[in-house]
Amino acid sequence: MDDFLNVIRNDHHQFDKGKLEDHFGNEPFALMARWLREAIEKPASEPNAMMVSTLGLDGFPRTRVVYWKELLEEGIVFYTNYNSDKGRAIDAYPQVHALLYWPELERQISITGLAEKVPAEMSDAYFESRPRGSKLGAWASQQSQLLTSRDELEKRVGEYAEKFPDFVPRPEHWGGYLIKPINVEFWQGRPSRLHDRIVFNLKPDNSWELYRKNP
Ligand SMILES: Cc1cc2nc3c(=O)[nH]c(=O)nc-3n(C[C@H](O)[C@H](O)[C@H](O)COP(=O)(O)O)c2cc1C
């Protein structure tokens, strides 16, 4: 048992070695891509699961997990139902916050940004790549709306399966959101709670300023 714990301790120690002390670059995207790749390679469990918080119409923030599906030059993309609670919230307030947490790497990335719908062609392309069951689910689920019974949902899946025996088109209410970051913080756990926090902040001239924060 002790040996086992030692292995884990050593593993953590390895990741404490100055990962955030060099080569930050002058924009956050390269480091985001590197950390995602390293999370996949680790492998971290659910490396692309991220918490996305929105501002509700009632003023309360709400957070849920979605999958980070694309990394573009301008930001990161997730897919969802545009009529869901999060979709309606973003329509009203594009200000969102996204959080990636990889316990295996003692890392988190905290992203403040503005969300916007991606072009329809991008949503089409991703939708097309999904399994048939997920495609039918996107039609059948009125995400975040009240559901009277599980049967009702499964009945709707059956109806859409009949309606679309072969090709399942993308529902217009389903697609991607691009989160364009304005502030990105990379957090690396360090011994004695003296963690590294490196922040990229977007300036009005569209360049990124870089600074450290106290842990
Ligand atoms: C690991 C995980 C991944 C998820 N990925 C997505 C996703 O990519 N898109 C999505 O709409 N919901 C996803 N969900 C479900 C959401 O967390 C949430 O329940 C749903 O989107 C409804 O949220 P809303 O009512 O706040 O809009 C995921 C849940 C988990 C636990």
Image: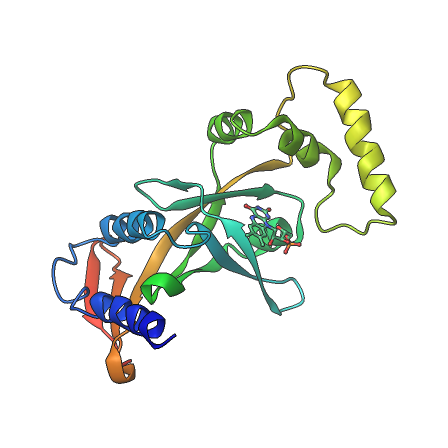
* Closest to the observer, 191 or 6: 6
Quadrant of the drawing holding the C terminus = bottom left
Quadrant of the drawing holding the N terminus = bottom left
User: Would you say 67 lies left or right of 92 here?
Assistant: left
Residue 52 visible in the current orientation: yes
User: Would you say 108 lies left or right of 166 here?
Assistant: left
User: Would you say 204 lies left or right of 82 here?
Assistant: left
On screen, 170 above or below 74?
A: above
Q: Residue at x 39, y 54 (%)?
A: 44
Name the residue furthest left: 22
Q: Residue at x 62, y 70 (%)?
A: 60
What colouring does the structure picture have?
rainbow
Q: Residue at x 32, y 61 (%)?
A: 184
User: Would you say 111 lies left or right of 152 here?
Assistant: left
Residue 145 on image: x %, y %: 76, 50
Residue 158 on image: x %, y %: 80, 28
On screen, 101 above or below 157?
A: below
Q: Residue at x 75, y 23 (%)?
A: 161
Name the residue furthest bottom: 192
